[in-house]
Amino acid sequence: MDISASDIYSFYQSKLGSLVKRTIRQKIISSIDETKHIDVCGYGYVSPYLSFINKHFPKSNVIEFRPDFLDGAVKETVDFNQKFIHEYFLPLEPSMVDVVVSTHLLELVEKPQSSIEEIWRILRPNGYFISILPRRSGIWTRYDNNPFGFGRSYSSSQFKNLIDNYFVLDKKNSFLHFPPWGHYLNYKFYKTFENLGNHIFPYMGGLMVCVCKKIVYAKTTSTSKKIPIKNVLTT
């Protein structure tokens, strides 16, 4: 991998990273039902957002599973359970959580469909998978001063093809319309850039948030090699 947890952590400590973190937090929180007592699982490098979820939903149960390719060199103080795992195995029984949130995952893993299969397995029926992804035609993927400039990026159709056998895409929004520049004008007017982009160019953001609902019985195809987990779940 060309990027590690240390690199991602350093980015979020920067001024530009703080703006990104604030914007992504708002997108994730707005996608979660506040009225429910929920079990939330983070998959990838999700700690900047799980901390906020834990505070925003005090009755929720929150845990982060960070894949082993994101090294554990960074020792963060978090207020939720955090475990380092094999990148394609989440150590939970089937149908255990209500929401899975992933950031810095599908663009970095070698086999993203294997990660999708695991997310499907641990979600309860009608559970939600919230993914933050770099948008293929977005400007943030063209700069290596941020974590979204590494790994693969996704178009809407590519992501839909990835989840097709497992999830229904319930909602998708593009955001992060301000540029990835460390310039004082960017820091001063990023809210203006974001508001203008949302109203004038709503499909031209650098990132996209995809909210997906679990299909209870996953489809099978003759060409794909699935992890043999479907027989475990009898819902």
Image (cartoon, rainbow, N blue to C red):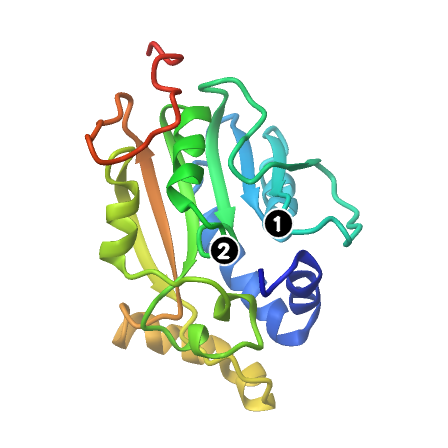
Q: Which percent across, then down, holds residue 88?
A: 51, 36
Q: Residues within 10 Å of mark 2 (few under 14, many from 20)?
A: many
Which residue is located at x 66 percent, y 46 percent? 51
Give the left or right position of residue 75, taking residue 118 as reference. right
Residue 69: which numbered mark, if any?
Answer: 1
Above or below 209: residue 216: above
Residues 56 and 181: in front is 181
Amino acid under disc 2? Leu
Assign a secondary structure to mark 1. loop
Count of numbered marks: 2
Q: Can you tell which quarter of the image residue 218 is in? A: top left
Q: Which percent across, then down, holds residue 87?
A: 55, 40
CA distance for labels 2 and 1:
9 Å
Q: Can you tell which quarter of the image residue 59 is in? A: top right
Which residue is located at x 62 percent, y 38 percent? 64
Q: Which percent across, then down, holds residue 161?
A: 24, 47
Which residue is located at x 34 percent, y 75 percent? 197
- Tell me if label 2 and label 1 are in contact, CB under 8 Å: yes
Label 2 or label 1, whichever comes before in sequence order:
1
Residues 94 and 48: in front is 94
Above or below 5: residue 35: above
Amino acid under disc 1? Phe
